Image (cartoon, rainbow, N blue to C red):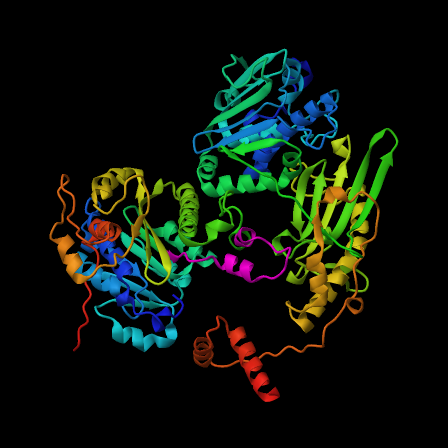
């Protein structure tokens, strides 16, 4: 969240765009719990509010709260607010606890940075409060852990390994015993980050259940890996208690066509194809099971990426106004 | 009717109820420590096996293993470390407190006669202990609710042996606790708790693991960590060995090692090890000397811990055949500060840590003046080789170079200044460097080259 709105135009990130559209399809399926439009959406809207625009337009969500820590640019955020969105200024760690959690929420903690202890604190705040049927999505950057960067910069010969530094940052209870230095960069780092988020949610829920006599669990729905400039990953899951577990079953998230088999993360990869090529493949989609795609000179790996998630990929055109 | 006419009165009943006893017993021990207590019992088994074999190799516990499974439904711990015979089960293993006549494992770590019972009662309301030596097999099965409800009868019922993990041909012990207490089940269900057990075993039982004992938690084998101290030419840790003898009592030896390790704030401090079991790990409290004031003069004897001491490593190992002579508390979470053995050792620890602290202060000053990249003293330290504590057997004092004696380059001065983020980022981009520091250095070097030209 750290002032990245000054650097990145959120609307021009195609993989992120696809992720948001996939999330729309995931959230659509929440109806066994309640009408989706009655959920409250909590997000980090920045000045672009791309997720808010999409969720309001596509899902009809009316109650929207954007958490914004850059209080200095207050006026700019207010002016860019596309709808009647309530902007709560302050750090997420301070804002999350003061929100109203009595209704079901969809909270998307869409961080720009790699996992850090403060994010685990945020996740705990949500897990301590969200009621059954609420959805939590968390996105973190997973290029390279700061501990690995420090390690590589350190010129000391007998220096601490990167994973030791990482353990000292988070505490050894939070980092799986088998984690090594090579878990701190790229997609393995994303896997580790998601695992740690789940560990933290589980921990908060076990304490909450004990004091409140509840039996809430966090059920992962999907994990998404994508890359525009930096590698990012997202964990999406729902809080559900025993009494509502059957609602979650009824959501049938696994019927979404982009859900990979065997619990693997969804990997959003941008095919590099010309408009003409896209059209040629698109004419053959959805593909009947018994037919192969007629590709001509189109590279099959790009065609495969495209046909796997063409419904979610953006169509770009330069428009001069 | 006067009182003297009455039949003799029944004596006043002061027998504790079982429920009260169980509650008292389990109250003061953290759940994590209760798990470690059970592991300690397995370690004592491995120690007996090694002693019987007169194994003096570097890995005396090779072949001994402990397997722990923790989840929301049950806790189980199995070991192949020799098991207990029926007489031990009858007379000692389940007694609350150790009968005076009970034999002790020499150099044991599970010495207080409460560990196993305390852990079992702490975890749940139903436990089953099965054990086998090479000549006897037995099992005990206790439903705690039923047991508590029976008045009198402080005994546990024998049961049929059901575990296929143990037998006369595979001596060992298999313990299962079910019907877990609600708060225990909640903790056992989390990855966080399992990770913390793994981390604790890794550090607390590190010596036994590196001596060959195999410990698995939920099917993950735990490897040991070790503490390393840096050694170089004219650079050695301080080592001292104290002996405490008393007539008719086993001797206690205390070996103290102080020196430097790699810079790692969370590993820095004192480690106290009792008969091989780590009791304090990287301790930085006044109990081990940090932030200790001289009472009369209000002068600091040893400063409080600060990150400039991130290389400090201190190790105290107490060893005795009679573990009750060792200065640790019953939960093995701290030292017994009132013990005479501890107090004498502590004074020596303070004396020995002083020169290391002084050296670390010098090192800090040298880094401050020359930067981390160019400090000659730091370079000297980082070139030193790490060695395990077992290599320091001789009594020596801590030796390290002083600032004036290490080779120095030209005198340096540190420059520090601030500019707007916008300008710094602009230059960072223009000069294609990755940090604000690099912007400053590159600008300086460019101007210097130009001006010198």
Image quadrant where one finds the C terminus of chain A: bottom left
Q: Quadrant of residue A206?
A: top left
Question: What residue is rendered at 75% in x and 20% in y?
Answer: B101
Establish if A87 lies above or below A15. below
Is residue A151 located in the magenta-colored stretch of the structure?
Answer: yes
Furthest-right residue in this view: B247
Residue farthest along the left direction in this orientation? A283
Q: Is residue A60 magenta?
A: no
At which x and y percent is residue B369?
69, 73
Say if residue A200 shows up in the picture: yes
Location of residue B168 with respect to A252 vertically, above or below: above
Q: Is residue B117 left or right of residue A305?
A: right
Where residue B140 sits: x, y (%)?
Answer: 55, 17
Q: Residue at x 84, y 46 (%)?
A: B395
Q: Quadrant of the N terminus of chain A?
A: bottom left
Residue at image point 56% right, 14% down = B167
Q: Tell whether A163 sits left or right of A317.
A: right
Q: Is residue A248 above or below residue B58?
A: below
Residue lying furthest front? A297
Residue bounds of the magenta highlight: A139-166
């Amino acid at each position: 969240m750290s002032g990245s709105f000054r650097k990145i135009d959120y609307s021009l990130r195609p993989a992120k765009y696809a992720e948001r559209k996939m999330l729309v399809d995931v959230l659509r399926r929440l109806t066994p719990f309640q009408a989706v439009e009655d959920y409250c959406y909590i997000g980090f809207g920045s000045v672009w509010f791309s997720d808010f625009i999409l969720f309001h337009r596509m899902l009809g969500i009316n109650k929207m709260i954007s958490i914004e820590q850059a209080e200095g640019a207050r006026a700019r955020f207010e002016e860019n607010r596309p709808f009647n969105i309530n902007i709560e200024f302050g750090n997420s760690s301070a804002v999350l606890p003061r929100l109203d959690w009595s209704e079901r929420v969809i909270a998307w903690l869409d961080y720009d940075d790699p996992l850090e202890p403060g994010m685990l604190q945020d996740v705990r705040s949500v897990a301590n409060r969200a009621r059954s049927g609420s959805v939590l999505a968390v996105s973190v950057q997973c290029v390279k852990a700061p501990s690995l960067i420090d390690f590589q910069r350190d010129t000391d010969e007998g220096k601490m390994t990167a994973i030791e530094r990482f353990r000292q940052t988070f505490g050894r209870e939070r980092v799986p015993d088998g984690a090594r230095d090579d878990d701190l960069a790229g997609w393995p780092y994303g896997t580790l980050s998601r695992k740690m988020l789940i560990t933290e949610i589980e921990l908060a829920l076990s304490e909450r259940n004990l004091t409140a006599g509840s039996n809430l669990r966090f059920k992962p729905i999907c994990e998404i890996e994508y890359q525009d400039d930096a590698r990012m990953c997202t964990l999406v899951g729902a809080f559900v208690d025993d009494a509502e577990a059957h609602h979650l079953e009824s959501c049938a998230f696994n019927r979404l066509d982009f859900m990979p088999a065997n619990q693997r993360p969804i990997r959003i990869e941008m095919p590099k194809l010309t408009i003409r090529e896209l059209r040629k493949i698109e004419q053959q989609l959805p593909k009947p099971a018994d037919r192969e795609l007629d590709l001509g000179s189109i590279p099959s790996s790009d065609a495969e990426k495209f046909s796997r998630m063409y419904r979610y990929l953006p169509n770009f055109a330069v428009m001069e106004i | 009717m006067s009182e003297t006419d009455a039949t003799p009165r029944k004596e006043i009943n002061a027998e504790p109820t079982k429920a009260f006893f169980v509650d008292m017993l389990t109250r003061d021990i953290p759940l994590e420590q209760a798990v470690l207590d059970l592991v300690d019992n397995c370690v004592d088994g491995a120690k007996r096996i090694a002693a019987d074999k007169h194994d003096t190799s570097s890995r005396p516990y090779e072949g001994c293993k402990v397997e722990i499974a923790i989840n929301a439904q049950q806790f189980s711990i199995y070991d192949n470390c020799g098991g207990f015979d029926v007489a031990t089960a009858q007379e000692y293993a389940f007694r609350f407190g150790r009968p005076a006549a009970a034999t002790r494992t020499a150099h044991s770590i599970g010495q207080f006669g409460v560990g196993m019972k305390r852990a079992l009662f702490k975890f749940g309301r139903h436990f089953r202990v099965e054990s086998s030596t090479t000549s006897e097999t037995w099992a005990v099965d206790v439903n705690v609710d039923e047991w508590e409800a029976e008045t009198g009868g402080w005994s546990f019922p024998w049961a049929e042996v059901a575990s296929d993990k143990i037998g006369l041909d595979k001596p060992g012990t298999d313990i299962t606790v079910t019907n877990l207490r609600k708060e225990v089940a909640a903790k056992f269900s989390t990855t966080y708790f399992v990770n913390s057990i793994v981390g604790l075993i890794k550090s607390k039982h590190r010596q036994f693991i590196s001596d060959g004992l195999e410990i698995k938690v939920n099917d993950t084998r735990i490897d040991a960590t070790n503490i390393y101290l840096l050694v170089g030419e004219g650079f050695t840790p301080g080592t001292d060995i104290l002996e405490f003898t008393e007539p008719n009592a086993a001797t206690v030896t205390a070996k103290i090692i102080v020196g430097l390790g790699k810079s790692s704030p969370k590993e820095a401090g004192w480690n106290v090890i009792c008969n091989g079991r780590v009791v304090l790990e990287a301790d930085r409290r006044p109990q081990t000397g940090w932030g200790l004031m001289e009472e009369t003069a209000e002068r600091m004897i040893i400063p409080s811990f600060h990150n400039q001491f991130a290389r400090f490593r201190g190790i105290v190992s107490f060893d005795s055949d009679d573990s009750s002579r060792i200065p640790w508390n019953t939960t093995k979470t701290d030292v017994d500060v009132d013990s005479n053995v501890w107090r004498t050792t502590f004074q020596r620890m303070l004396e020995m840590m002083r020169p290391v602290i002084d050296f670390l202060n010098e090192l800090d000053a040298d880094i401050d003046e020359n930067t981390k990249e160019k400090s000659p003293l730091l370079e000297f330290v980082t070139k030193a080789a790490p060695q395990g504590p077992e290599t320091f057997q001789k009594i020596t004092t801590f030796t390290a170079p002083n600032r004036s004696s290490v080779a120095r380059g030209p005198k340096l001065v540190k420059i520090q200044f601030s500019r707007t983020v916008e300008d710094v980022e602009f230059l960072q981009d223009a000069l294609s460097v990755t940090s604000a520091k690099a912007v400053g250095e590159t600008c300086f070097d460019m101007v210097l080259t130009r001006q010198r030209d």
